[in-house]
Image (cartoon, helix red, strand yellow):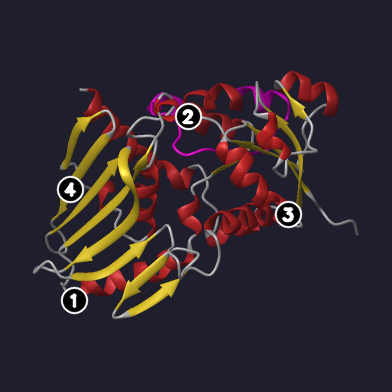
Amino acid sequence: MKRKIIEITIIGSGHYAIDLISKEYTRNNNCVIKAVIANSYDKNKVENSPLKNVPFFKDLTEWKTKFGKADSNDLFDLCVHENSVLDIVKELVKTGAKNIILPKPLPLAKKSIDQLLTIQKEKNTNMFVASQWHYCDILDKTRLILNKLKKDNKLKKVTVDFSQTFSEEHLRKYSVVTALLPHMIQVLSKIGLDEFKITRNIEVNNSSSTNLEIKYKIDKPYPFEIKLMTDLKSKEKRRNLYAYDENGNILLSLTFSGNNMHKYPILYYNKRYFEAREHDLTKMVKEEIKSLIDNNKNKKVNKIMNLEDYLDIQKMLITINGKIQK
């Protein structure tokens, strides 16, 4: 019996498409990169990437002229910004696309999300969301520890800080909501601190177009506070999470950028270091491809981040964006 191979079409030609996700697809033996659809691209960057010998098409019309209708083996990965997602999905389903990976965040309008859900249902389409922290195994361990800390009434405050310098070019494409905040919200969801689903007491301090601080307090089972910070002009790159007790002592820490001793995200707890076993993007691609090969059986064990699974995170992002726009 011939082994099923998933054929990837990447839509977009930015850093994520060329430098990151294309390498992960190349490492996976169950898929091949079939094509790239992009209006333009940096030829020098492509020459030094896994996309060097992959055919490029300027639009979906050119792709269809070459390949015809999409089939069940085709997977389209949208490596684009959120404002173009809905239009691209509409065009993809017209050509028969059944498997689509959506970027994070999704469009920051409820109407657009509703349309995506309708398309998914009516066209019987698999829609995944490329939210890589959902696949980070060290966050599962963190969740267990935090659950115990909450049960023992020790957890009083959690801070998350994702900051770095964004170039002027990137700041024209990203906002303080769409840049790093989706990563933080996904982390909170994964580690069981997704109380943002039930609280309306969200305090948003948007001191500038590149700086954002968010606070919300939880009352049950006992009071504690969550604080998110992101600075897109920070001279220092930060990717960390700290949990504190009532005296301000650090109970645990998470570092997402690795360091000189550790390659992957690191959890520090009870005087011990724990490192993720696998890169989150590698795991994400592995699970997405496996789910398609297994005819989506993996969905039953909730390994895949489906569109429906991402809705609470997206709702939080839309709420925060709305508070900023007021």
Inter-mark Cα distance, 4 to 1: 21 Å
Q: What label sits on residue 293 in the rendered view?
A: 3
- Is 287 in front, or is 23? 23
| Residue 149, picture quadrant | bottom left
- Residue denoted by label 1: 152
- Residue denoted by label 2: 82
Tags 2 and 4 in contact by the CB under 8 Å rule?
no
Along the polypeptide, which appears first: circle 2 or circle 3?
2
Quadrant occupied by the N terminus:
bottom right
Tags 4 and 1 in contact by the CB under 8 Å rule?
no
Local crowd size for mark 1, using a 10 Å CA cut-off: few (<14), some (14–19), many (≥20): few
Give me the residue at 33% from left, 72% from top. Answer: 268
Quadrant occupied by the C terminus:
top left
Inter-mark Cα distance, 4 to 3: 41 Å
Inter-mark Cα distance, 2 to 3: 28 Å
Tell me which amino acid carries mark 4. Answer: Tyr
Local crowd size for mark 2, using a 10 Å CA cut-off: few (<14), some (14–19), many (≥20): some
